Amino acid sequence: MHVPEQHDSGEPNAEQQPVRSHEIIVIGTSAGGLEALKRLVQKLPIDLPASVFVVQHVGPSARGMLPTILGRLSQLPVISPSGYLPITRGTIYVAPPDRHMLVRRDKVCVVRGPKENRHRPAIDPMFRSAAWAYGPQVVGVILTGLLDDGASGLWAVKTCGGVTVVQDPDDAQFPDMPINVLRTVDVDYRLSLEEIAGQLIRLASQPVRRNGPINPAAKSRIESELVVRPRSIDEMAGMGRLSAFTCPACHGAMWELQEDDLLRYRCHTGHSYSLQTLLSEQSDEIETAVYAAMRALEEKAATLTRLAGQVQGISVSEKSRLERQARELESSADIIRNLFAQKA
């Protein structure tokens, strides 16, 4: 599906400069992403006039084999950067495990930073940083994945004048991420995986169109900086309104950020949650708390039972009281266990 692009010639964070082609391609994926990336990179030509940046959700203890795997299939060099590295055209950069990858003007930056949407690396911070640094020269791509990391980042790409591409949900192994993007962002291209590579090649070879003004969001710059350093509470107040929720990670106050139809939450230390991710995190917290309560009930019941049977000289009435309390606690633990079994 092709939708006419609306681009501008300027950069949101710098003086107006001559705009070249769409030379920055940012790609985000999660579940199912390995196979999707393997199929995509092998179709990119050796003379691609763009730099490609990839974030796939991986655990902090992952071995970081993705660059090696993709490098076996790609005609382009594939590297996992560290620190600050100059950007080289015709190179694929892959975010390393447990690090965010940010795109600065002429540099790629790798930092630890707070998790976003429960992930590090996360898609949103890379997309936002690229959008602010390169504006209309950016192409943002969301592939297969769960939940909705990437929706806010692709929104930033769109509002800073870049081109937005999403894998058709019917073509994605895990359609959640593409579906959530389509719900919240007016994307330029909705394509199958087989079509995306060809479209990226065409966009990388085309000059950016100058069809009107863009509307860059200043908070894209602020949020890009949040990955590197926390903001003051006063600064956060300028980005959104204080919410009733606390951050699941650090238990600090969170601010509600509204981006068109997209609602998000962020604390001043840098943790960020989409509404779906926040709900998932709260569910995990509830489950942890309930199991902790069940464990405490069972342990106290066992202690009371042992006390009733082992204390010398205890009266019959006292022994009966302790055993009754133990049974009540065991009954309460059973109620919790049965409730959880019904929800499973």
Image (cartoon, rainbow, N blue to C red):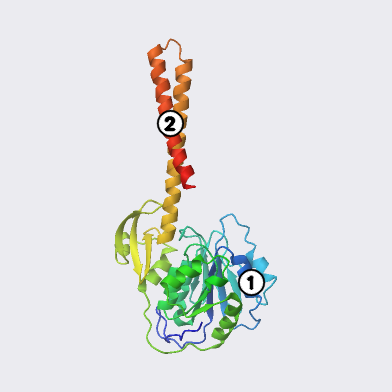
- Above or below, 305 relative to 248: above
Q: Is residue 85 left or right of residue 156?
A: right
Percent coordinates x, y for residue 330 in the rendering: 44, 30
| Residue at x 57% of width, y 72% of height | 171
Q: Is residue 190 left or right of residue 323?
A: right
Name the residue type under label 1.
Val
- Above or below, 4 relative to 179: below
Percent coordinates x, y for residue 78 in the rendering: 64, 71
Q: Quadrant of residue 133?
A: bottom left
Please tell me whether mark 2 or mark 1 is closer to you in this view: 2
| Residue at x 51% of width, y 89% of height | 207
Q: Which residue is mark 1?
A: 78
Of labels 2 and 1, earlier in sequence is 1
Q: Quadrant of residue 72?
A: bottom right
Q: Residue furthest right?
A: 72
Q: Residue furthest front?
A: 342
| Residue at x 64% of width, y 73% of height | 39
Which mark, by number, is residue 331?
2
Along the line of sight, the residue nearer the viewer: 88 or 32 = 32
Q: Residue furthest top?
A: 313
- Above or below, 239 relative to 301: below
- Above or below, 17 relative to 339: below
Q: Could you say whether the residue bearing mark 1 is in a helix, strand or loop? A: strand
Which mark, by number, is residue 310?
none
Along the line of sight, the residue nearer the viewer: 195 or 159 = 195
Percent coordinates x, y for residue 212 in the rendering: 38, 88
Name the residue type under label 2.
Ser
Percent coordinates x, y for residue 253 in the rendering: 33, 55
**How far apart are labels 2 and 1 at the CA level?**
58 Å
Q: Is residue 172 visible?
A: yes
Along the line of sight, the residue nearer the viewer: 201 or 180 = 180
Q: Could you say whether the residue bearing mark 2 is in a helix, strand or loop? A: helix
